[in-house]
Amino acid sequence: MKWRTVPVDKLTSEQASEELMALAQEMSEHDVAYYQNDDPNVSDADYDALRLRNEAIEGRFPALKRADSPSDTVGVVPESGFGKIQHSVPMLSLGNAFDLQDLEGFDTRIKRFLSLDESEIISYTSEPKIDGLSASLRYENGVFIKGATRGDGQVGEDITENLKTLRDVPITLPKGVPDIVEIRGEVYMAHDDFETLNRQQSDKGRKTFANPRNAAAGSLRQLDTKITASRPLKFFAYTWGEMSEMPGDTQSEMMACFDAWGFTVNPDFKVCENVDALNKHWQDIEERRSMLGYDIDGMVYKIDRLDWQSRLGFVSRAPRWAIAHKFPAEKAITKLLDIDIQVGRTGALTPVAKLKKVTVGGVEVSNATLHNADEIKRLDVRLNDYVVVQRAGDVIPQIVEVLVEKRTGEPHAFQFPDNCPACGALAFHEIRADGEQDAVRRCSGGLSCPAQAKERLKHFVSRSALDIDGLGDKQIDEFWSYDLLRTPVDIFKLYQLANEAPEIWLYTSGKNKGQLKDSLTKLFRAIEQAKNPDLDRFLFALGIRHVGETTARLLARRYKTLEGFRDAILSMCNGNEESKEELASIDGVGDTMVESLLTFFGEPHNLDIVNGLINVGVAPVSLPEAENNTPISGKIIVFTGTLTRMTRAEAKARAEMMGAKVSGSVSDKTDILVAGESAGSKLKKAVELGIETMTEDEWLEIASTA
């Protein structure tokens, strides 16, 4: 999503609600791409801008904060290919500082919270922020017993055996360490090792990696441990989780212990006595950044005294006592060779600059995003121009400037196409809820557009949608290339096609006959099981513009069945205003979403697919009816802090089943606040407002007896 240009203080309540919904959905997709697929699709800088925009809107409209707010999430739910490990202590994220003013504000907040004088000296630790994959290592009685990824901060993937292959991960610790030791840090790949690995991959005709972070994450999360063992992965230790006893009173003392126990601590770890010292260390590392031999995207600062860390505690998804100070993006100059228009799942036409290869921040770059037609016009970028390329956040390159003084080529401005390059359908600009024209131009072809169709198929089978195990991006691409898949309906005909068209076996080429048969048997079983998804997952799977997971659940609860939902929308398409008013009356559904639903079902091809799915036996299951005679029926509940006996998602689902409405923020409309461990500002605000509060145990007593 290209966020609105409307200033936050000018947004109406309806605009704010719709934008928060869109931000939650887009950032969730970015999180999956980054944490789960190891293939980020947006730069760190753009992602940070989305988060800041979200926080600003929530700050002005606290009552609109969503239950799935990005402010309260860390990472994503672990993949099903690995076992799961519940973190005994949550693995949280960090707040960000982007300049000296932000850093001074952090220091001021610390002193204010601790009631310290301005003259009080606070010692901080400072160390490079490694761009890799977070991991947690648990030792009991000095022996490494299990290791996990961050996951969603509460539950991670079990990668114990893979971590054992890293030289920087001791299998046993020296005598005298605490009985329980949980070391946390970052798995990464050095630049030299990354280049060697990519050279080897290329020589063997295999896929190369985009950058060292992707290579490290992809290597560590291999189901075959031998592959991980063959990769040159390293580990920096920088913090801890559960400890049966603390061997030090400060962050720096703890790092010294880690070093003595055989872990690698970053050699640029340093204790600084004030903000000026932190900033000087930041400048020093930034100057030496390209010579470190591994990727970093900033510095991390922490209060050195552990007793102060304990007093400061946590807020939302991050500790109050630590912050990440980001580096600016790296830049280089190169030549623009062409502009390619790519079509995404939602029909968005995205211009991609084809560049003469150039190294930016240690990575070879040949493509860069140009965002949309307005960005091309703003930059006045033309073919054969010399341009300044920036790897914002060291992920996706973007063009930030055109060197007009060096222009010798194309005299005419680039003409953005009026038609979709994939199907020829008209490309149009949506009109937003505020009446303004959206910057992104979209193909009107919908599911009939081949570029959209394949991406929508991938969305249809994705984990948050129908979750068909064994039918991922690679398999979709293969089936598509053999003309076996074109619409979601075709998925449920694959078993029949397997008997009629032997080509279907080719997608698993390289396996022996027995493996092929096993793979297809499992796939067909998964497809059969997918015929009865929950209605909300099915509606989300359709990929209707503006219908995210939360909205799909609202629609599923209102209309009960797929047929009921379809008929209600068709009634609106035929001009039934009463049906339209009923849809618009659902809390969380705005005019933009109503128009999106009408557009989707008004396209005959889309309706044919929905009806076709019904005809091949797809029968979504209605969500259980919410109870209306429980102690919390009709009440607004907020969950805060860390729940230890059930996940936050389970608690919210149970509350909704009991007829309650779950909110993400505390207001005078809140009826009950359930406070888990380390509850912070929400609990304080609830007490100030006189709102009923209860512990997790008290909540479970109500939840289990209702």
Image: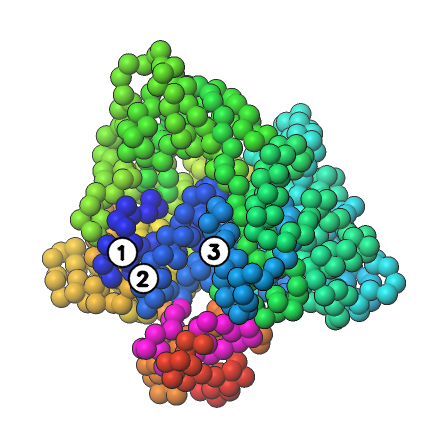
Instruction: Identify which residue is drawn at 86% across, 65% down.
Output: 176
Give amino acid for label 2: Arg
Which residue lies most toward the right here?
A: 175
In the rendered image, residue 294, in percent from the top left (x then y), is placed at: 65, 37
Q: Nearer the viewer, residue 109 or 397?
A: 109
User: Is residue 653 at least partly visible in the picture?
Assistant: yes
Q: Which residues are magenta?
A: 654-683
| Residue 287 placement, left or right of 398 | right
Is there a contact, CB below 8 Å, between mark 2 and mark 1?
yes
Residue annotated with mark 1: 9
Per the rendering, the mark at residue 105 is 3
Give amino acid for label 1: Asp
Q: Quadrant of residue 574?
A: bottom left
Label 3 to label 1, Cα distance in Å?
A: 22 Å
Label 2 to label 1, Cα distance in Å?
A: 7 Å
Instruction: Identify which residue is drawn at 63% across, 34% down.
Output: 288
| Residue 519 placement, left or right of 349 | right
Task: Characterize the local packing of mark 2: few (<14), some (14-19) or many (20 or more) Cα atoms within 10 angstroms.
Answer: some
Task: Characterize the local packing of mark 3: few (<14), some (14-19) or many (20 or more) Cα atoms within 10 angstroms.
Answer: few
User: Tag 2, which secondary structure?
Assistant: helix
In the rendered image, residue 6, in percent from the top left (x then y), is placed at: 26, 49
Confirm whether the magenta stretch covers residue 409.
no
Label 2 to label 3, Cα distance in Å?
A: 20 Å
User: Is residue 654 at least partly visible in the picture?
Assistant: no
Instruction: Identify which residue is drawn at 41% across, 23% down.
Output: 387
